[in-house]
Amino acid sequence: MKKECVAMLLAGGQGSRLYALTRSVAKPAVPFGSKYRIIDFPLSNCVNSGIDTVGVLTQYRPMELNAYLGNGQPWDLDKSDGGVHVLPPYLGAGEQGSWYKGTANAIYQNIDFIDMYDPEYVLILSGDHIYKMDYDKMLDYHKRQHAAATISVLEVTLEEASRFGIMNVDENDVIYEFEEKPKEPKSNLASMGIYIFTWSKLRQALIEDENDPTSKNDFGGNIIPNLIAKGETCVAYRFRGYWKDVGTIASLWDANMDLLDINSGIQVFDKSWPIFARTNICPPHVCGPDAVISHSLVAGGCDIDGTVDHSVIFENVTVEHGAVVRYSVLMPGTVIKAGARVEYAILAENAVVEKNAVVGEDKGPIAVVAGGVVVDAGSQVPAGAMYTEESKGGEA
Amino acid sequence: MLNNVHGILMTNQPGYNLKDLSSIRSISSVPYGGRYRLVDFILSNMVDDGITDIGVVLQQGYQSLLDHLGSGKDWDLARRQGGLRLLPPFSMPSSNSQRIYQGKMEALIGLKDYLSEIKQEYLIVADADIVLNISLEDVFEKHIASGADVSVVCSRKFTDSPDYATYFTLKEDGSADEVLTRPEGDCYESLSIYVLSKSKMIELVDYSAARGLNSFSRQVLPLKDKLELKVVPYLFEGYAARFPTVADYFEKSMDLLKKDVRDDLFNPAHPIRSKDRSDPATYYGSESKVVSSMISDGCVIEGTVENSIIFRNVKIAKGAVVKNCILMKDVEVDAGASLNCVICDKSVSIGANRTLSGCETYPIVYAKGTRI
């Protein structure tokens, strides 16, 4: 059936700067904020915005992400018409197939999928940002501006601007130039990696881009500049609200800490724009007789009998008597044994900190323990370390 | 896997009295353990052991149960074949007389058509108000091995005030000897989970219909010798709880604060499922003090909580003190309020600086939506 707007979510990124956290999962599947995974934010935004057809483009380590998405039921995307579709790269009959060469190529390879819904518009999203946004308002703006492309932008400081793709606009917010990480930015409008295209224009641009052997097949680097060069109307849509890129350990930790200010930022307690997640079946958490918990989020299934302060605790975490956890993110199944100390750290799923071990130090930088790794009793993981099975072996 | 077994859950318990907790809902949908309804336990046990075809016999006050079960998708029971079958009382022949059924047999007589269409050869019929985590697969295997006509799951740790249960003394071969209505000497207490073949059940339903028998445990089972029924108790050693009174509900809810009880009930390999809601995690404020308590998702706790069971989305403001309480979903406790030994049903709100106190043996229940 025809859809007005189909969303395509680029979820193939490796997230190499999250190294120890993305060794076995794609970045969008990285746990975030006690209950969620990063991809829950764009997916929930879609559903809350009335978009019920989402293609998720996967490539790197897709197993866990595929299992997480399943039939899309947690997001009400289990639909007979539309819903969530996982789209890996594929080999066509008698042709050369290939991995997705770039963001634009990923969409190019799925033109047939989009055509199946014959949409007027296509929304391009990425799976590495934490934000709440009504895409329907952006779509209204796109229609009102009669644009070929609308790019959601955030006003940043000029110092920050050199880290982003920057949109240079005229007085009507029409983009005349896109600059990737400019040394001397002319504008402070940073691309949020959220695009709405009129599908007929994008479809043509994708085909032309694919035929250009010099192209990097990238939205920011190729598709948008080409549309501007052809004189198509590309406009900036100014977004005001919380938006955080979680592509690095420091920013992922920051974004988790931001969540603790429950009345500002992303406001996960605000029911008017709920964030949905696939939740594990677990009983409520339990605070033991000696638990001390302050300024923290704690999810179901945990057993806390130690001290937890300024931390984000996922499901089924154990913090034993006498253990101290401060300014840290403990992903599902983490175990902190008696007398251990964890500060300014991110512990991936099922990591274990044995008795009296120490991870990180006050004020950081952030120490990371990879999934399933055991920090031996009495040992120490220094601040800023990436502690993995290999690095552990190396130290011994 | 119990794919030749059909589950039937009975959702009402005549004779139970949980005051305001059960006046607005059937016993089986009484909230329990922070995020569950009583029905979740036996229903999850059935699903975990591979029963995919389950009928739920509704009686009165089933609105909240319908809300909770929905299509059954949270138990993987929203299926094209089989799945969850809700059986409202309108199918009873006696419904024209406004009479509600008093026992299993009366309900099943009304559901004769449903019974005869069941595809599976065996039935597990259970009351949906018992809290336990049991391997029904094991119960079924022992049922087959023992050659019993009826197996009854039993406990030796009595769960009830004696008015509500059935007890068995045993013969040397392990089958039931006498069926008692009060415990006497060395006996087993029935947990009201029965295994029998569909054909035997239909036979007993017809027999009961002809003689006006309403209760399976108290009228049919005592006739076992006359009916030549081999009734075999299955001894369940794990934790089990039922709540005929508010005091039972309070006391046994607090059992959840014991680790061994939690480990018994919440086995990750045999999970208790419940209705899924998208709540965030629980936020603890900078001045919160929470010890020896069970806390569900979505709460904002800035005050003090001790020895309590807190359901989802409860708000406890700064300076509020909650001790020995059960606070259900969406309860709000304002700053400076003090609560001891009270049970607040859903959406109760307690104003600032109010003091409410019950007693361990006589906890006070505040009805859904009460504002104080």
Image (cartoon, coloured by chain):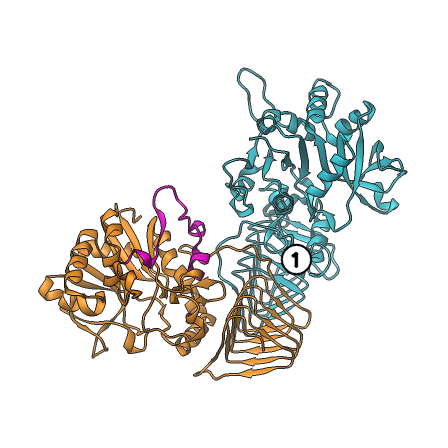
Chain colours: A cyan, B orange
Residue B146, image x and y in percent? 17, 57
Tell me the residue at 44%/49% (across/down).
B73
Residue A17, image x and y in percent? 70, 42
Magenta span contains residue B87: yes
Left or right: A332 in relation to A261: left
Residue B208 vertical placement versus A280 (above, below)? below
Which chain is disc 1 placed on? A
Name the one closer to the observer, B244 or B300.
Answer: B244
Name the one closer to the observer, B204 or A146.
Answer: A146
How many discs mark residues in the rendered view?
1
Quadrant location of residue B205? bottom left
Magenta span:
B64-92
Tell me the residue at 65%/41% (across/down).
A127
Q: Mark yes or no: residue B27 visible.
A: yes
Quadrant where the N terminus of chain A is found in the figure = top right
Tell me the residue at 45%/52% (across/down).
B74
- In this figure, which residue is indicated by the disc labeled 1? A270
At mark 1, the secondary structure is: loop
Magenta span contains residue B223: no
Left or right: A389 in relation to B44: right
Q: Mark yes or no: residue B135 visible.
A: no
Q: Name the kind of residue labelled 1 in the image.
A: Asp
Residue B357, image x and y in percent? 53, 83
Tell me the residue at 65%/44% (across/down).
A49
Disc 1 packing (10 Å; few <14; some 14–19; many ≥20)? few
Residue A193 vertical placement versus A36 (above, below)? above
Name the one closer to the observer, A158 or A4.
Answer: A4
Left or right: B257 in relation to A248: left
Residue A227, image x and y in percent? 78, 26
Name the one closer to the observer, A39 or B92.
Answer: B92
Toward the front, the furthest residue is B96
